[in-house]
Image (cartoon, rainbow, N blue to C red):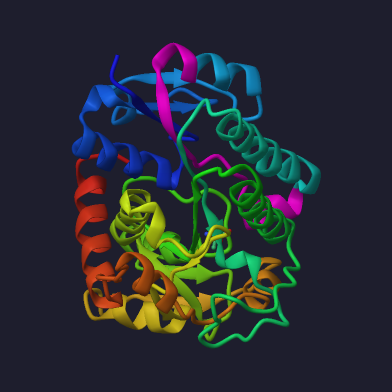
């Protein structure tokens, strides 16, 4: 049997689009999507399994039965939700990572992708052009779990030869799936509300600049990193990815070029504190040098794509 790829947490924002991209690249039958909840239509167009990311035995049984050699672990609790359920977030984020790291250590899988985040940085990190190597004192549960996760990835690589690869995603913007409880979710919510009500109440302040990225760029980064030759990778914790940086006022301005009457008001909530602890922009020259990473989509591109596609989905009633 040819070896297969497994995506754990495939129903989430990244997992759904990653599954489609990997199936396009390697063939539908070669990519198994899995999640603790039932898959949507897109995921069910190929192999789909119910799987709990915290259940080592269940993952081991599946990878042995299906001859899985590559795993993308996308199950995680994001920043805003994790502040509400700290122990649950810690347990999910760490147990799922140890499960796949240990399967790789036992040589049951050959290669592993695990997502980190800009949340690994904190208020004492430089906020502009945050370097690859920097002070990291995250102040959120999610950030602490990602930072600890990065240390463990590097440890398993150095001590057990595990081929684990990772990027620090910025806020990700997409129209196919809704975001799942993060601080950067406003940058998706705003498009939905713009089309539904022509106005939006933002939970971050107007000048809260954060690094963001269009989903297609994030998927390209993920797959290029996984396809890069081992020898070219100098980072086994997680690579910085810059994307583009903007704040809610700038995004609202970009939306106004398409919807001139669009109105935004600001009502910051507990997520403001999280955003204030994160970098405003990221230096990703190490990723550029090691595996040729380059961001493609600008704020203008993203605005146009989001409005056009969401408009179509609302008119076809597919949301
Ligand atoms: C979040 O807001 O929690 C995520 C992230 C930046 O990792 N989108």
Residue drawn 66% across the image and 43% down it: 93
Quarter of the figure that contains the N terminus: top left
In the image, is residue 156 above or below residue 243?
Answer: above
In the image, is residue 245 part of the stretch drawn in magenta?
no
In the image, is residue 287 above or below residue 308?
Answer: below
Q: Going by the image, does 112 lie left or right of 156?
A: left
Total numbered circles:
0
Ligand 1 found in image quarter: bottom right
In the image, is residue 73 part of the stretch drawn in magenta?
yes
Q: Which residues are magenta?
A: 63-84
Q: Going by the image, does 200 lie left or right of 237?
A: left
Q: Nearer the viewer, residue 39 or 53?
A: 53
Q: Nearer the viewer, residue 305 or 123?
A: 123
Q: Going by the image, does 80 lie left or right of 27?
A: right
Q: Nearer the viewer, residue 231 or 37?
A: 231
Q: Position of residue 319 (x, y in %)?
A: 33, 41
Q: Toward which corner of the image does residue 307 lie, by quadrant?
A: bottom left
Q: Position of residue 119 (x, y in %)?
A: 62, 65
Q: Toward which corner of the image does residue 80 lie, by quadrant?
A: bottom right
Q: Position of residue 205 (x, y in %)?
A: 58, 80
Q: Position of residue 179 (x, y in %)?
A: 47, 51
In the image, is residue 67 above or below residue 141?
Answer: above
Residue drawn 22% across the image and 71% down it: 301
Q: Nearer the viewer, residue 224 or 168?
A: 224
Residue drawn 58% across the image and 34% down it: 100
Q: Going by the image, does 7 lie left or right of 295?
A: right
């Amino acid at each position: 049997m040819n070896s297969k790829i497994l995506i754990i947490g495939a129903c989430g924002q990244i997992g759904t689009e990653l599954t489609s991209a990997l199936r396009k690249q390697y063939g539908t039958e070669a990519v198994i999507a899995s999640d603790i909840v039932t898959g949507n239509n897109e995921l069910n167009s190929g192999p789909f399994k119910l799987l709990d990311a915290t259940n080592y035995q269940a993952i081991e049984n599946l990878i042995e039965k299906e001859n899985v050699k590559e795993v993308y672990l996308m199950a995680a609790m994001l920043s805003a939700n994790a502040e509400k359920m700290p122990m649950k977030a810690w347990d999910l984020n760490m147990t799922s990572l140890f499960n796949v790291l240990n399967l790789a250590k036992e040589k049951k899988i050959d290669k592993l992708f695990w997502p980190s985040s800009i949340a690994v940085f904190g208020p004492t990190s430089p906020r502009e052009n945050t370097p690859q190597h920097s002070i990291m004192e995250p102040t959120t549960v999610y950030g602490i779990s990602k930072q600890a996760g990065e240390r463990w990835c590097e440890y398993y690589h150095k001590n057990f030869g595990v081929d684990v690869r990772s990027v620090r995603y910025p806020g990700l913007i997409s129209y196919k799936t809704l975001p799942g409880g993060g601080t950067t979710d406003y940058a998706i919510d705003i498009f939905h509300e713009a089309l539904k009500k022509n106005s939006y109440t933002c939970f971050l302040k107007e000048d809260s600049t954060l690094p963001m990225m269009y989903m297609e760029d994030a998927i390209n980064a993920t797959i290029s990193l996984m396809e890069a030759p081992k020898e070219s990778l100098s980072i086994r914790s997680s690579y910085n990815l810059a994307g583009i940086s903007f704040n809610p006022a700038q995004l609202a301005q970009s939306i106004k070029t398409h919807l001139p009457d669009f109105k935004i008001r600001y009502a910051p909530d507990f997520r403001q504190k999280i955003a204030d602890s994160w970098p405003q922009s990221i230096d990703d020259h190490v990723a550029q040098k090691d595996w040729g990473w380059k961001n493609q989509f600008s704020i203008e591109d993203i605005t146009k794509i989001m409005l056009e596609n969401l408009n179509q989905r609302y008119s076809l009633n597919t949301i």
